[in-house]
Amino acid sequence: DAGVIQSPRHEVTEMGQEVTLRCKPISGHNSLFWYRQTMMRGLELLIYFNNNVPIDDSGMPEDRFSAKMPNASFSTLKIQPSEPRDSAVYFCASSPTGGYSPLHFGNGTRLTVT
Amino acid sequence: KQEVTQIPAALSVPEGENLVLNCSFTDSAIYNLQWFRQDPGKGLTSLLLIQSSQREQTSGRLNASLDKSSGRSTLYIAASQPGDSATYLCAQGGSEKLVFGKGTKLTVNP
């Protein structure tokens, strides 16, 4: 079990550029979550999927953010255009049955927008 | 709105001490309470999950309790070690998703 794999680990980009974060969940896990972590706000849920279908995207800050899960083994979080206030660590997590079972987190992508 | 609060934000103890981390939540319709550990630059690692029907869970030197009526959970760490230094987060499972506290940063001094 390789765990949840996120790429890239670090991303530095200029304001206005498009950013794409990637996640490979643990095989067999039906739920996938995208979180954002900042010092001020802690961990915030952005969106979660169940069986590849977006269930709740109420945490997505605005239309600049979008997420997809084209199949059970891959998800992307895209920010277009990026802004300095998007700078944060973005985590992907997966679990067998949503919040009813332990979540397994990736090591995160540290995004810096200058 | 579900809210999870962890106090204190930071805690420093000498090695060998027993300690308790606190977590409070506002939603009585809780499905479970999960405790995680986060090391610097890393993701979160699940430590313990307490179902709403349970009172506590134990794993090694860790014991987590849940009191739904008071909206509180505690994580007890016995005989603390420097390797226990990390940030500990609790999360309330209300349905399919979790709401996290901001964590308690624990430092265990040799």
Image (cartoon, rainbow, N blue to C red):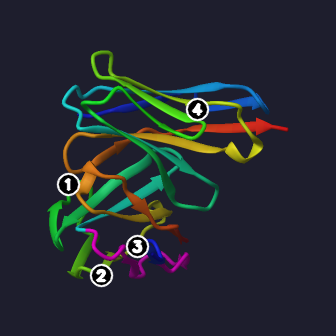
Query: Could you say which quadrant of the image residue A22 lies in?
Result: bottom left
Residue linked to disc 2: A73
Q: Is residue A61 visible?
A: no
Q: Please report, as a chain letter, where disc 1 is located.
A: A
Say whether marks 3 and 4 touch (CB < 8 Å).
no
* Circle nearer the N terminus (2, 1): 1
Query: What's the amino acid at mark 4?
Result: Ala
Which is closer to the viewer, label 3 or label 4?
4
Residue at x-position 46% and y-position 32%: B64
Residue at x-position 37% and y-position 56%: A103
Q: Nearer the viewer, residue B110 or B62?
A: B62
Instruction: Tell me, yes or no, whether the highlighted magenta stretch contains residue A25.
Output: yes
* Circle nearer the N terminus (3, 2): 2
Which is closer to the viewer, label 1 or label 4?
4
**Quadrant position of the C terminus of chain A in the picture:** bottom right
Q: Please report, as a chain letter, where disc 2 is located.
A: A
Residue linked to disc 3: A82
What SS does tag 3 mark?
loop
Q: Please report, as a chain letter, where disc 4 is located.
A: B
User: What separation in Å lies between label 3 and label 2 (alpha carbons)?
Assistant: 26 Å
User: What separation in Å lies between label 3 and label 1 (alpha carbons)?
Assistant: 19 Å
What span is colored magenta in the figure? A7-29
Residue linked to disc 1: A58
Say whether marks 2 and 1 touch (CB < 8 Å).
no
